[in-house]
Image: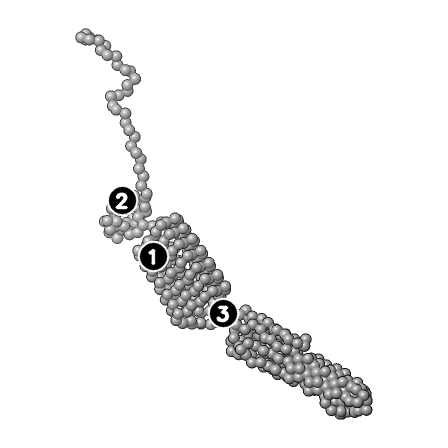
Amino acid sequence: MSGWFPSRPEDVDASLRSWFPERQPRPVTSQTGWWALLTLDAKLSVEYVSTAELDILRGMGVVASVSLTREVALQKLGMLAVARTLSVSGAATLGKLQSFDLETVLELASAVTVGRVANLDIARSEALEAAVALEKVLPLAIAQTATAERAVDLKRVGTLEVTRLFQTYREVELVKTGGVAVAMPVALANTVELLRRRNILLASGFVVGMSVAMGFQPLTPVTQSFTTAGAYTYTFPRNAIFFDRIMLGGGGGGKGMAFVDAWGSGGNGGSYESDTVQRGVDFAWSVTSFTGTVGQGGQGGAGSFSNGAPGATGQATTSLVSGGTTLTAAGGAGGTTANPANVAGKSPGDRTQGGLTVTGGAQVASGNGNVPGGGGAGAVASTTPGGTGARGVAAYRAYQ
């Protein structure tokens, strides 16, 4: 410094760089950008704009569309509302949605996977060209029409309610369904398989285009014969519908012979009774068994010095079913006279009913009768008894 001053100047801090206060940095802001298609005098322009600019351009009426060209992933949304039309040309993944509301039309050209959806509401129509898989869905409400061109798989569904019309052109499989309520008609063009069903309620009509299998599993015909004299119980297969029954009574016993006597006559074979009965027609569906008795053969007449006793009549064979017809096949008559020309124990012959056949015991010249149902021969030696008749048989054939 130079010159004269009235007082000594203060020392100046050499570290100061300027006379301005310290500058504060401006906060940096960012906005989401959109690719917008603009129309100006019949010309198209694709511009990347901010949200605010997009709102202004929309107010001017020049925004034709806002597009995402690759893939859309919507996850953990509380509400997705589409007022007009939602078009998906590739694939869309919707996960963990609380509510999904389409006001007009949903068109899907390829496939949609919807997982863990609490509520799916389609107010107008749903057109699916390929396949839809709905898993772990609590309620599914379709107000008008659901059309599936190929296949629909519904698994672990609590309630399925269709209030108007439900059409399938290929195949529908319902597995582990608690209740199916159909308010109008059900039209099936091919096949329906219902497994583990609890209740099916049809309020109006049920129309089948080809065939519906809602009965028992197929059954190969099963035959059962009871060959021990006495009571029996026949518990038939639960999926059987028709039953052929053949009952044959026990054979009669042959006549005994005295010391001075002619040969005794043989016993007759047992009698047959047979028929075919149907569950739900001849007896109730709730019945699960037949009961009855297999007839014992008649005892041969005793031989003695003074007299030859007559043979006993065979016992009847029976078949009883609750609420249905009882079959009773009488036993054969025993030999009662001395007749050298009629000593043989008679055969009952054979019997066929539907697909069931019983072959009776053959005739015998002496001794006991042949099973089933053959008569015993008459005695041919002095003081000897006649032959005992053979027991009868109860035979069944269960089939569809």
In this figure, which residue is indicated by the disc labeled 2?
A: 53
Q: Residues within 10 Å of mark 3 (few under 14, many from 20)?
A: few
Q: Residues within 10 Å of mark 1 (few under 14, many from 20)?
A: many
Q: Nearer the viewer, mark 2 or mark 3?
A: 3
Marks 2/1: CA–CA distance: 28 Å
Q: Residue at x 38, y 69 (%)?
A: 184
Marks 2/3: CA–CA distance: 63 Å
User: In the rendered structure, are the residues bearing label 2 and label 1 in contact, judged by CB atoms less than 8 Å apart?
Assistant: no
Q: Residue at x 28, y 52 (%)?
A: 64
Q: Residue at x 37, y 62 (%)?
A: 142
Which corner quadrant of the image does residue 369 belong to?
A: bottom right
> Where does the N terminus fall, quadrant-wise?
top left
Pick whichever of labels 1 and 3 is earlier in the sequence.
1
Mark 1 lies on a secondary structure that is: strand
From the viewer's perspective, is 92 left or right of 330?
left
Mark 2 lies on a secondary structure that is: helix
> Where does the C terminus fall, quadrant-wise?
bottom right
For badge 1, the amino acid type reads: Leu
Pick whichever of labels 2 and 3 is earlier in the sequence.
2
Q: Nearer the viewer, residue 113 or 256?
A: 256
Q: Residue at x 28, y 20 (%)?
A: 17
Q: Residues within 10 Å of mark 2 (few under 14, many from 20)?
A: few
In this figure, which residue is indicated by the disc labeled 1?
A: 102
For badge 3, the amino acid type reads: Met
User: In the rendered structure, are the residues bearing label 1 and label 3 in contact, judged by CB atoms less than 8 Å apart?
Assistant: no
From the viewer's perspective, is 242 left or right of 183?
right
Q: Nearer the viewer, residue 276 or 99?
A: 276
In this figure, which residue is indicated by the disc labeled 3?
A: 214
Q: Position of residue 164 (x, y in %)?
A: 36, 66
Is residue 374 visible in this depiction of the protein? no
